Amino acid sequence: MAINIDSKIPEGPVAEKWSNYKAHQRLVNPKNKLKLDVIVVGTGLAGASAAASLGEMGFNVLNFCIQDSPRRAHSIAAQGGINAAKNYQNDGDSVYRLFYDTVKGGDYRAREANVYRLAEVSNSIIDQCVAQGVPFAREYGGTLANRSFGGAQVSRTFYAKGQTGQQLLLGAYSALSAQVNAGKVKLYTRYEMLDVVIIDGKARGIIAKNLVTGKLERFSANAVVIATGGYGNTYFLSTNAMGCNCTAAMSCYRKGAYFANPCYVQIHPTCIPVHGDKQSKLTLMSESLRNDGRIWVPKKLEDAKALQAGTKEGWEIPEEDRDYYLERRYPAFGNLVPRDVASRAAKERCDKGFGVNNTGLAVFLDFSESIQRLGIDVIRQRYGNLFDMYEEITDVNPGEKRTSKNGMDYYNPMMIFPAIHYTMGGIWVDYELQTSIPGLFAIGECNFSDHGANRLGASALMQGLADGYFVLPYTIQNYLADQSIWPRISTDAPEFAEVEKATEERIQKLMNIKGKRSVDSIHKELGHICWEYIGMGRTKEGLEKGIKLIDELRKEFDTNLFIPGSREGLNVELDKAIHLDDFITMGKLIAYDALSREESCGGHFREEHQTEEGEAKRELLLCGLLEVSGQRCYRTRAHQGASRIRSNQSTNP
Amino acid sequence: MFDHDCREGICGMCSLYINGTPHGKTERGATTCQLYMRKFNEGDVITIEPWRSAGFPVIKDCMVDRSAFDKIIQAGGYTTVRTGAPQDANAILIPKEDADEAMDCASCIGCGACVAACKNGSAMLFVSSKVSQLALLPQGRVEAARRAKAMVAKMDELGFGNCTNTRACEAVCPKCETIANIARLNREFIKAKLAD
């Protein structure tokens, strides 16, 4: 059963929709802005930029984060770069091409109007960051430098060494800090939003837990914006930080916000492989490394076996015995194929037995050729910190020459394997980034809007800042235009008491289980189930089994969880238990969505739906809001024929 | 209780004094979360403490309150530019050497190891890294004087000590910031004060 939803896409050709919207939208006059409060949950790229921009405009902003400082958000760890359609390289880039590449990279499942807008504002983001003093890499002539990322044939990515996310976040954090100093933003650090409060059908506030005192507190506002990131930690091992969770997003889902495309989970092809059982996360090796690194496995199965047994090392295998499989299978893109393609290709080789470490789940990323061509200094300048990070973790230096043969130098190759990294799915939002609950907005990774079934590298940073600096500050005014004549909502309203009571009851229930298993032990089990059954290759039987196992795990959680410590004060295990409660729900949502999607597309690969060459086989599916076994999921429509973009028609809802 | 998050040495949350050194390393350039157990031997005794400084009150066990760092940035660690339509990013050329040096200064992760290592509890390496980043870029020159004065004043107000050039901070910084930053801040500060 499909329900029609209004995405509020403006009329007109796609290239004019955003200008049309801005010309005709309602605005809040400057004096009235001073009377309005906005809650922003999260201080990553999207949250910090939104809070700063709204504060500058005059709104009173309440900005929440779970860590001790806004600068700790996991956006800080993003490495490789941010896309923009500047065409400084004169290699054929344009707003249209960035739009096209992003839609195509998303396997044609993104809402075109949103993506075009993203490409349109991308240039302003770079300008804004430079004005903030973000130290982007420069050429000798003093202009900004660019590099290439996967899924594109132009060099449009701006970067700051291998720490672009850090610098962009610190730019937004600086802007946020200026507004805190100006008294326009009030920061609530070490607070976690546990639920949204809805009054007369509109989002009017939140209940948040003070993580230090343990107390639940009420906060009211004229609008609520969540910018709380993705749900990758459902898989326990991911490139996310330990604190990353989907609790805020799940609370909105439970209150009726639609969740869209949950099964579109991005598995990043170049992460440091799993080492053992006690591992707490997987570390990302930036996609930018694929600019100069070449991915390979041995051609001969006996070489692979020797690598797995530890009797041979990667550098010992000569050039002619190396299978550069991405270059072999995809000559047009080579090593820079989109992430889903690269991840599945790695899985394919490892499934056939060509894995290069003791678990058989790793491939090589090698810099020998580029170091020889450009010199170690240039390579270190581009990726220095990434090489150091790799060496810290594995004790192997990818910049160390091991031997020379027939005029070729052989360096230590990096070992990499796909890992959960980003979630394209998220809270459904319309063109205004408003969820299906009026007054509740979602920005950044926690919404579903711009990346379709697969996100291109360097576009998450672009989306977070686009949403926060240049989209939400406009669209939220259209909603708030009425609010200035309404009184401030008191947190004494009965709805606040109700939600606070329900939240406390939920916490008490968890505290009182007093079983025998720790949060982490159950979380690890959830991670194994999810990686196995809703990972890179999904099947009908696997998904049905996964759902069954998750149901059993839910029972185990509800009856056998043990949370040490008391309800009062700091209790990190309790906070983790709340996160896990929501991860279990999320795992099931992903599995149901994957089961009902009988096709392969982007981050969702159903083994039963592949072409002869092992590529994704896309189908035209029913779209819209669906009820699947009691779970509400929103699914975007596939395009007919993957090659044309129809720009003057309302396409994806 | 101890703070931790990214496990990859970039968020700055983890903050343990291990065997008498912030982040426990004798070689430079890594955080607590990047100190692997393979660096220790069976039977070793490992002593773990929180960051110690008047500027970082203890919340519980090894968790300390570093909001003083946020307050210092709020005092001036930014360029005053509204979100809007700034000029084209290439309009002002920046020499590569300056951009690279600014990037090195900007790598500070705000962990506070510098404060913890310093016998005076000085925050000069933290403050000077941000001031240096912006001092090296043309966009930061506009408010350079105001920034140096405001951030140093805030640092003093929040209870951090003064710098006596022991270089303990530089030795433990996980991002390899150097006291060249402190020298630069001193120059900016003196220039700003002389102009008053």
Image (cartoon, coloured by chain):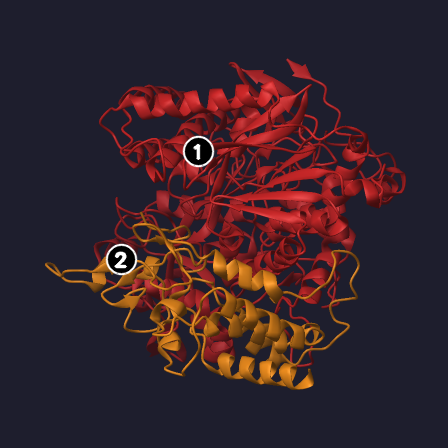
Chain colours: A red, B orange
Q: Residues within 10 Å of mark 1 (few under 14, many from 20)?
A: some
Q: Residue at x 45, y 31 (%)?
A: A538
- The amino acid pointed to by label 2 is Leu
Q: Which residue matches tag 2?
A: A307
Mark 1–mark 2 contact, CB under 8 Å? no
Q: Residue furthest left?
A: B43
Please state, as top left, top right, bottom left or bottom right, where the N terminus of chain A lies in the image. top right
Q: Secondary structure at mark 1?
A: loop
- The amino acid pointed to by label 1 is Lys
Kindly identify which numbered label has been placed on residue A215. 1
A645, above or below B40, in the image: above
Query: In which quadrant of the rendered view does residue A62 lie?
Result: top right
Q: Residues within 10 Å of mark 2 (few under 14, many from 20)?
A: many
Q: Is residue B164 left or right of residue A119?
A: left
Q: Is residue A303 left or right of residue A456?
A: left
Where residue B54 sits: x, y (%)? 39, 63
Chain letter of mark 2 equals A
Where residue A456 sits: x, y (%)? 60, 49
Please state, as top left, top right, bottom left or bottom right, where the C terminus of chain A lies in the image. top right
Where residue A274 sits: x, y (%)? 32, 49
Where residue A329 sits: x, y (%)? 52, 51
Chain letter of mark 1 equals A
A32, above or below A128, in the image: above
Kindly identify which numbered label has been placed on residue A459. none
**Residue A18 visible in image:** no
- Which is nearer the eye, A636 or A468? A468
A530, above or below A148, in the image: above
Mark-to-mark CA distance, 1 and 2: 54 Å
